[in-house]
Image: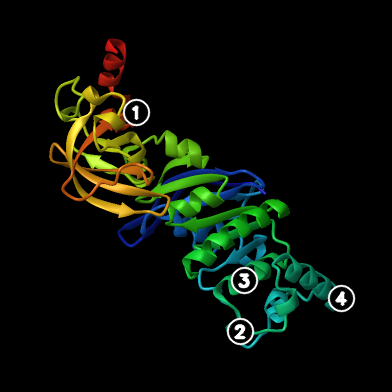
């Protein structure tokens, strides 16, 4: 089922929740609506569901305009952040609730619930009540309940927010595999970029009520189209003028940019770096253990930069001197982002 929003506007008083939103979700895709708090992502989800109504613009589901169609007639399953399970009902009863409301025959209800409890891996717990389940198990029940009426579109509002970190990671992988297995068009809201990158086929990034960029996670990460996306995605450091660094001095005036950890090479001495002449001198301000590596904060020419360093290399400590080679930077020239490579690297390679 394809979903399309055309020129959607939605205000709450003077606040613009949606400001000329245009987007298309292809049939069978798992889409992540990603953005900071107040960016308009949840409003978009609720308008698709029919829980909010646009002030202007059109919403199409499977080619049909649904602006005036009640939520219950849109063929949508909705999974809420807080599960919204009935405490007095068992797993089976929660899953079957919507089917009973629709007056589906009992035999068909039983067959569908049997299939769903197997799908979510809770067949052995189908007689338990929500309070007897873990957070991850409750979210699986909420997922199954949304799927019970066999919707053609599934909407999920921050489905992992109420779950602890380890279970959240496991549930993300399970949800992606299950949705792809079912082939159901799905849209989920999140403010967690790691979650969006891991789960979604495509990401739609929202900011101040409009869509900043849409596309596959890798494409958005590697080729951000706007300064906001470059700053929002990844572990970014904003620099007001990147021309102060070696290899980026061409051009006049101030040049704003973004440096990501993978853009830097941090070395303890010249022996660790291939092109020391292209590197800056820096002072280590902090070192953070990240499990498989360490993150190092280095001050270079008054700028605090962050980069990664292997555990196998010589340890760096606060106050140590370090060499920092900046390979590239995202430039904001003309309001768009572009990758600027370090020219000093090219010059040094010629000399060597």
Q: Secondary structure at mark 1?
A: strand
The residue that disc 1 covers is 338
Image coordinates of residue 125 in percent, x first then y, are 70, 79
Note whether 186 is above or below 71 in the view shown: above
Note whether 104 is above or below 185 in the view shown: below
Q: CA distance from mark 2 to mark 1?
A: 52 Å
| Callout in the foreground (4, 3) | 3
Image coordinates of residue 332 in percent, x first then y, are 28, 32
The residue that disc 4 covers is 107
Image coordinates of residue 243 in percent, x first then y, are 18, 27
Q: CA distance from mark 4 to mark 3?
A: 22 Å
The disc, 3 or 1, on the residue closer to the chain's N-terminal end is 3
Residue 132 numbered tag: 2
The disc, 2 or 3, on the residue closer to the chain's N-terminal end is 2
Please name whichever residue, 49 or 314, is drawn nearer the observer in this view of the structure: 314
The residue that disc 3 covers is 142
Image coordinates of residue 132 in percent, x first then y, are 61, 84
Q: Are marks 1 and 4 in contact (CB under 8 Å)?
A: no
Q: Secondary structure at mark 2?
A: helix
The disc, 2 or 1, on the residue closer to the chain's N-terminal end is 2
Give the total number of marks visible in the rendering.
Answer: 4
Q: Which picture quadrant has residue 300?
A: top left
């Amino acid at each position: 089922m394809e979903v399309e929003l055309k020129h959607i506007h939605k205000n709450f008083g003077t606040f613009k929740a949606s400001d000329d939103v245009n987007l298309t979700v292809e049939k069978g895709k798992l889409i992540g609506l990603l953005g900071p708090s107040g960016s308009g992502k949840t409003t978009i989800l609720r308008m698709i569901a029919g829980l909010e109504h646009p002030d202007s613009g059109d919403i199409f589901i499977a080619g049909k305009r649904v602006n005036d169609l009640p939520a219950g007639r849109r063929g949508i399953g909705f999974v809420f952040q807080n599960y919204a399970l009935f405490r007095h009902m068992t797993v089976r009863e929660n899953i079957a609730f919507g089917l009973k409301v629709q007056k589906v025959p009992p035999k068909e209800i039983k067959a569908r619930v049997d299939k769903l409890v197997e799908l979510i891996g809770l067949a052995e717990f189908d007689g338990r009540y929500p309070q007897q389940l873990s957070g991850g198990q409750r979210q699986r029940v909420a997922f199954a309940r949304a799927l019970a009426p066999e919707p053609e579109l599934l909407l999920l509002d921050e489905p992992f927010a109420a779950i602890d970190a380890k279970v959240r990671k496991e549930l993300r992988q399970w949800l992606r595999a299950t949705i792809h297995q079912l082939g159901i068009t799905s849209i989920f809201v999140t403010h967690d970029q790691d979650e969006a990158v891991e789960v979604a086929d495509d990401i739609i990034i929202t900011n101040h009520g409009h869509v900043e960029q849409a596309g596959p996670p890798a494409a958005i990460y590697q080729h951000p189209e706007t300064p906001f996306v470059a700053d929002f995605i990844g572990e970014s450091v904003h620099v007001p003028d990147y021309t102060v660094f070696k290899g980026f001095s061409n051009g006049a005036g101030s040049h704003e940019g973004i440096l990501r950890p993978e853009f830097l090479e941090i070395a303890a001495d010249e022996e660790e770096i291939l092109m020391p002449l292209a590197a800056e001198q820096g002072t280590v301000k902090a070192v953070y253990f990240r499990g498989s590596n360490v993150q190092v904060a280095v001050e270079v020419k008054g700028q605090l930069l962050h980069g990664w360093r292997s555990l196998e290399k010589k340890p760096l400590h606060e106050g140590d001197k370090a060499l920092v080679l900046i390979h590239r930077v995202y430039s904001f020239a003309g309001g768009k982002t572009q990758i600027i490579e370090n020219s000093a690297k090219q010059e040094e390679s010629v000399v060597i």
